[in-house]
Structure formats: structure tokens, C-alpha cells
Image (tube, rainbow, N blue to C red):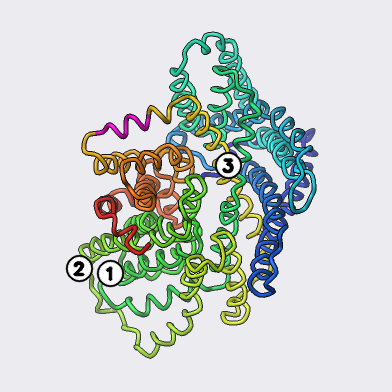
């Protein structure tokens, strides 16, 4: 993710338009309050359902239904916040190479493209909500329009804030030029629609490669790039109504399993705030800090443990880097080496539950979340062992004469202090595997556990940070969920066009059977992970390729591990992987310094991924 920063003073600061800036601030505050309240309400509703079922032995029939309604509103208002703050996921590698003036124009162009998409789907979204008026929910017995209204209202608010951003962050010249350019491109496609109708399947290249690719590489947020390509394809080259796109978006964003996304994001922020992450790191540092490369091993182990709690890579890295980097630098570690290992561990732990990518795979492919959580532990250990091999080789000559070994009594005390934090990942996994709670509900158990630990054990709980944490949770969740919604629509368009059948024929026809299919999948998802990031790539191609894997005899969980690890390689590998740049930003290190050190780690991860692909038992041996 890359927030859009203004390069030059925008029109919003001018005297005549100052009131617009005040209006934007007020409206933004109201959306923040509503979004934060929705995150809190979802937690309360879900935990109430778990408490009633297992403590009071009386299920709340309406809890899931109410949570589903609140969730769609949370997703849309979170998307509004992400657009307002410039935090929708996008590819910026090419845009960042431009001059400051040109980069400012690309920022304005991206906002104008978002406006164009929102204008195209405004009426279909409104029509979709009106059609839901006649539908009554089974448990609450209210009109489903209360839920569906989130789509047109959210899109309307996004359009309003897009206009505000265009005025605030761009000069008048840049704003006008970007709007005129987008309008000209949309007009050109509209006039060409009779010709496009006769192109048949070539429109797949025009829209899903040409339009989507151009949008992604020019820095337009990925969700809107997918949306523009899908709306263009369906509206200009087929006779299907655009309301179908809204229906698919609603379907993609409405899986109850996806409610785990905001809750685990909040849990990741919570463990950092309560000091649980710091307690784990201090114990590991006391245990291994006296061996050569000891703190590097601690970094690998800490990422494995923390990733198992938070599910958010940004939260993982932000929790660990400030605790370890200062001491590692004192021992002579180079900044580039630090961010290289931090990024590599981010890729290594992509399969550690409760990974948001695993939750997404379960949502779009129907694979058991409990099986994915169980199957993800050992592959990450294999890749961790590969990273530790590189760490040993690079630190075999480290001078430890100045390092004081922590006494075993103190290590034992650090273990006692860290035990509640160390137990949390196992509590979460056990609750899912044993069927005590679903992957969605178990996040609320983790949140209650962390709150109690922070208040009663670690005595570190800053109430003032709760509201910003709720807002940040809604913002990141909205950015993720809007991608899932638009990518679901795009995947449906590809399926209707016959592309999925063609892809299946090509992949099943590869020489070498399942082994070649897995190797091609590693290469393909590594590229997709670097360009689209993990979640968009899996939502778009998961429904297409998982059936092919089954046809070739590849177990769903095994294939999921290969796919997720491959996407992690692309996501954290320079020069395109945004995860690498996130690690550099968290470590406050120039990205150029980590390029050479990370190559060895990426090679180790690639070898580990191939090992996981060749030995299915590593993924499915404990199912």
C-alpha cells in the first residue's frame, strides 16, 4: 500500500474553497466514527454468539445475520476511508520513478479513474439496492435493503471524497487534465463499442490485459483497475446488465468467513499495544541472543509466532522491527541485511494461520479453513529452516566477545512473562481445529484474551489508542475487501467468457502432469504476487486453477500452500514486490541497501517452496 502524498499545494487550501476543506474534515470524521463503531459492533455481536452457544447453551439465531449486515457496511465505509487517506492497494514501482510533477499528475489521474468507475456503477448499485427491498431476512425479518444500501451509499461517499482529494492534493491544471484524459478514454471506448462487439474473445486481451494492466502500472488502485476492466468488458462487449457486477461484488464481499479479516487486523494491532509481542521477543532474545546470528534467528522465530496471531504482515513487521533492529545494529548488522531478512520472513510466514490469504482462499474456493490452518504450519517451518541456513552461513564469523549471555534463571523468568503471549497462537488454532469456534469467531476469542492479558498481566493498555486502532482496522479492511469484491466480479466475467475453460485445457495439457502444473503455478503466482499482491491474485485466479489442480490429483490444501508461498515470494521480492518496500519503510532503510542481501534469502525461499511442492506430506501430513 502506498498513500498518495500531495506534491504541491492543492486548490483546497485557497481562500474561496477553504470551507470545502472544513466540510471534508467533518464528513471524514463522521465516517471514521461510524466505521470504528461498526468494527466494535461486529466484535461484540460475534463474541455474543460464541458466548451464548458455549456458555449459555442457547444459540443466537440472529447473530450471524446481523454481523453480515454490519460487515457489508464496514467494508464499504472502510473503502471510503481508504480512498480518503490514499491507502487503497496499488502498484507504485513505475510511478515512483517519474519526476515529482509527473508523479503528481499520475496521482490525480488515479483519483479521476476512481471517479469514472464510481460514476459507471452508481445507478446499477442503486438499482441493486432497490431490488433487495422485497427480500426479507429470515432471522431479523427486515428488508434486505438495509444491508444492500451499503453499496450505493458507500460508492457515493467514495465519489465525494475522490472529488475532495482531487481538489486537495492536485493543482487545478492537474485536476482538469486528469479528468479530461479519463473522460476522453472512456468516450473513445464507448464510441468503439460496436467494433468491440465483433471482437469476441479478443476483448479479454483488450480489457483484462490492456485496460487492467495499464491501470495497475499507472498507479490506479488495484480494486478500481479490476472494476474498470470488468465494467468495460461487460458494458461494451456483451449484452449483460451492469447490475450483474454489483451482485458479484456483493457476493464476493459478503462471505462471513471474510469477517475474520478486520478482526484479525485489529488483533494484530492489539498485541502490539498490550506489550504481548514485546514479551515474546524478549524471551526469544534472551534464549538465543548469545549465539552467532542469534538475533536473526529471533527475528525468524518471532515473525512465525506473531504472524500466527495477527494475520497482517504490516502489523507483524511493525511489531518486531523496533524491538530487534536497534540491538542488531549495535552488534554490527548492516541496515540492508536487516530489512532483507525482515522481508524474507514476511514471505516465509504467509502460510502461518490465521493468514488473511488462507482465509481468502477458503472463502473463494470452498477449502476448509481448519484444514488450511493445520496445513500451513509445517511449510512455513521448512522455509524458516532454509532462512536459518542462510543466517548461519552469513554470521558464521560474527564476533560475540562483547555479548553477555543472559543467565538461565532470567531466561526462565522471561518465559514465564511471555507464556500468556506465546499461548495465544495455540489457543486460536486449537479453537478452530477442535470446532469450538469458526475461523471468524475465534478472532473475537483472541481479542478478549489479549484485552484481559493487557489489563491484568502486562498492565499495558492505552485506551486513547483504541479509536485510532478501530479506524485503521476499518481502513485496511475496506481496502482488502473492495479488491475481493471487484476481483470476484472480474473472475466471474472471465468465467462467463469461457476463459476458465480454456485455461483449464491449457494447464491440464502441460507435459509432466501434476509436477509440471505445480512448477508452472509457482512461476505464475510469483509474478502475480509481485504485480497484484496476494489477495487480488488468489481471488482472481483461485476459482480458475483450483479445479484444475483437483483434476490432476493435487490436494486442495497442498496446492494452497504452494500458491500462497509463491505469491509471498513475489510480494516481498524487489523490484516490484510492495511487501519489500513496506519492510524498508518500517525499518527506515533505503530500499537500495537491501537489494543484494535479499537475493540469497529469496533463493532459499524458492528452494523451500519447491520442496513443499514436491513433498505433499509437508502440507497434508497432519490433516
- Give 372 or 21, whichever is nearer the viewer: 372
For the residues marked 3 and 1, what is the alpha-carbon distance in whole angstroms? 45 Å
Q: Residues within 10 Å of mark 3 (few under 14, many from 20)?
A: many
Q: Is residue 515 magenta?
A: no
Residue that mark 3 sits on: 252
x, y (%) of residue 588?
44, 56
- SS label for mark 1: loop
For the residues marked 2 and 1, what is the alpha-carbon distance in whole angstroms? 8 Å
Which quarter of the rendered picture does the C terminus lie within? bottom left
Name which of mark 2 and mark 1 comes first in the sequence: 1
- SS label for mark 3: helix
Q: Which residue is at 39% across, 39% downward?
A: 545
Residue that mark 1 sits on: 293
For the residues marked 2 and 3, what is the alpha-carbon distance in whole angstroms? 49 Å
Q: Which residue is at 56% across, 18% downward?
A: 238
Residue 398 shows in this picture? yes
Q: Which residues are magenta?
A: 503-510
Q: Is residue 441 positioned above or below 542 on the image?
A: below
x, y (%) of residue 12?
72, 36
Residue that mark 2 sits on: 396
The answer to which quarter of the image holds residue 297 is bottom left
Amino acid at each position: 500500500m502506498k498513500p498518495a502524498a500531495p506534491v504541491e499545494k492543492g486548490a483546497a487550501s485557497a481562500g474561496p474553497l477553504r470551507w470545502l476543506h472544513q466540510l471534508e474534515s467533518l464528513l471524514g470524521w463522521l465516517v471514521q466514527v461510524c466505521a470504528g463503531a461498526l468494527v466494535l459492533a461486529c466484535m461484540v455481536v460475534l463474541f455474543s454468539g460464541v458466548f451464548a452457544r458455549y456458555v449459555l447453551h442457547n444459540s443466537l439465531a440472529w447473530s450471524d445475520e446481523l454481523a453480515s449486515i454490519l460487515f457489508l457496511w464496514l467494508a464499504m465505509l472502510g473503502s471510503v476511508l481508504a480512498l480518503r487517506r490514499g491507502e487503497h492497494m496499488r502498484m507504485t514501482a513505475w510511478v515512483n520513478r517519474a519526476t515529482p510533477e509527473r508523479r503528481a499528475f499520475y496521482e490525480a489521474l488515479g483519483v479521476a479513474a476512481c471517479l469514472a468507475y464510481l460514476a459507471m456503477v452508481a445507478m446499477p448499485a442503486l438499482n441493486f439496492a432497490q431490488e433487495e427491498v422485497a427480500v426479507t431476512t429470515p432471522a431479523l425479518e427486515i428488508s434486505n435493503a438495509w444491508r444492500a444500501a451499503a453499496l450505493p451509499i458507500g460508492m457515493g461517499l467514495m465519489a465525494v471524497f475522490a472529488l475532495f482529494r482531487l481538489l486537495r492534493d492536485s493543482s487545478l491544471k492537474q485536476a482538469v487534465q486528469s479528468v479530461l484524459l479519463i473522460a476522453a478514454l472512456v468516450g473513445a471506448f464507448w464510441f468503439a463499442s460496436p467494433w468491440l462487439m465483433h471482437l469476441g474473445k479478443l476483448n479479454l486481451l483488450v480489457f483484462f490485459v490492456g485496460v487492467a494492466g495499464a491501470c495497475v502500472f499507472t498507479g490506479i488502485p488495484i480494486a478500481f483497475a479490476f472494476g474498470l476492466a470488468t465494467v468495460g468488458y461487460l458494458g461494451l462487449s456483451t449484452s449483460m446488465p451492469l447490475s450483474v457486477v454489483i451482485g458479484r461484488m456483493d457476493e464476493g464481499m459478503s462471505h462471513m468467513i471474510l469477517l475474520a479479516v478486520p478482526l484479525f487486523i485489529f488483533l494484530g494491532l492489539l498485541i502490539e499495544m498490550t506489550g504481548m509481542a514485546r514479551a515474546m521477543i524478549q524471551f526469544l532474545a534472551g534464549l538465543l541472543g548469545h549465539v552467532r546470528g542469534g538475533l536473526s534467528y529471533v527475528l525468524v522465530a518471532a515473525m512465525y509466532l506473531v504472524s500466527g496471531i495477527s494475520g497482517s504482515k504490516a502489523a507483524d513487521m511493525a511489531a518486531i522491527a523496533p524491538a530487534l533492529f536497534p540491538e542488531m545494529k549495535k552488534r554490527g548488522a548492516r541496515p540492508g541485511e536487516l530489512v532483507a531478512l525482515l522481508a524474507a520472513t514476511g514471505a516465509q510466514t504467509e502460510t502461518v494461520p490465521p493468514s488473511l490469504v488462507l482465509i481468502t482462499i477458503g472463502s473463494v474456493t470452498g477449502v476448509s479453513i481448519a484444514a488450511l490452518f493445520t496445513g500451513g504450519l509445517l511449510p512455513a517451518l521448512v522455509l524458516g529452516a532454509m532462512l536459518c541456513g542462510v543466517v548461519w552461513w552469513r554470521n558464521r564469523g560474527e564476533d560475540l566477545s562483547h555479548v553477555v549471555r543472559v543467565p538461565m534463571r532470567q531466561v526462565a523468568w522471561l518465559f514465564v512473562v511471555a507464556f500468556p503471549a506465546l499461548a495465544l497462537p495455540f489457543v486460536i488454532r486449537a479453537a478452530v481445529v477442535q470446532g469450538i469456534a469458526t475461523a471468524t469467531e475465534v478472532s473475537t476469542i483472541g481479542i478478549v484474551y489479549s484485552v484481559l492479558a493487557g489489563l491484568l498481566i502486562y498492565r499495558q493498555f492505552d485506551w486513547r489508542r483504541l479509536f485510532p486502532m478501530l479506524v485503521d482496522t476499518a481502513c485496511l479492511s475496506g481496502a482488502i475487501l473492495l479488491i475481493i469484491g471487484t476481483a470476484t466480479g472480474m473472475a466471474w466475467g472471465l468465467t462467463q467468457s469461457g476463459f476458465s475453460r480454456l485455461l483449464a485445457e491449457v494447464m491440464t495439457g502441460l507435459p509432466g502432469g501434476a509436477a509440471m502444473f505445480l512448477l508452472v503455478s509457482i512461476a505464475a503466482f510469483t509474478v502475480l504476487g509481485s504485480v497484484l499482491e496476494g489477495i487480488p491474485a488468489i481471488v482472481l485466479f483461485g476459482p480458475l486453477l483450483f479445479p484444475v489442480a483437483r483434476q490432476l490429483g493435487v490436494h486442495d490444501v497442498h496446492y494452497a500452500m504452494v500458491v500462497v508461498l509463491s505469491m509471498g515470494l513475489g510480494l516481498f521480492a524487489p523490484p516490484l514486490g510492495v511487501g519489500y518496500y513496506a519492510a524498508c519503510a518500517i525499518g527506515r532503510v533505503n530500499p537500495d541497501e537491501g537489494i543484494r542481501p535479499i537475493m540469497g534469502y529469496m533463493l532459499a525461499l524458492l528452494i523451500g517452496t519447491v520442496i513443499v511442492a514436491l513433498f505433499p506430506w509437508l502440507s497434508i501430513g497432519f490433516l
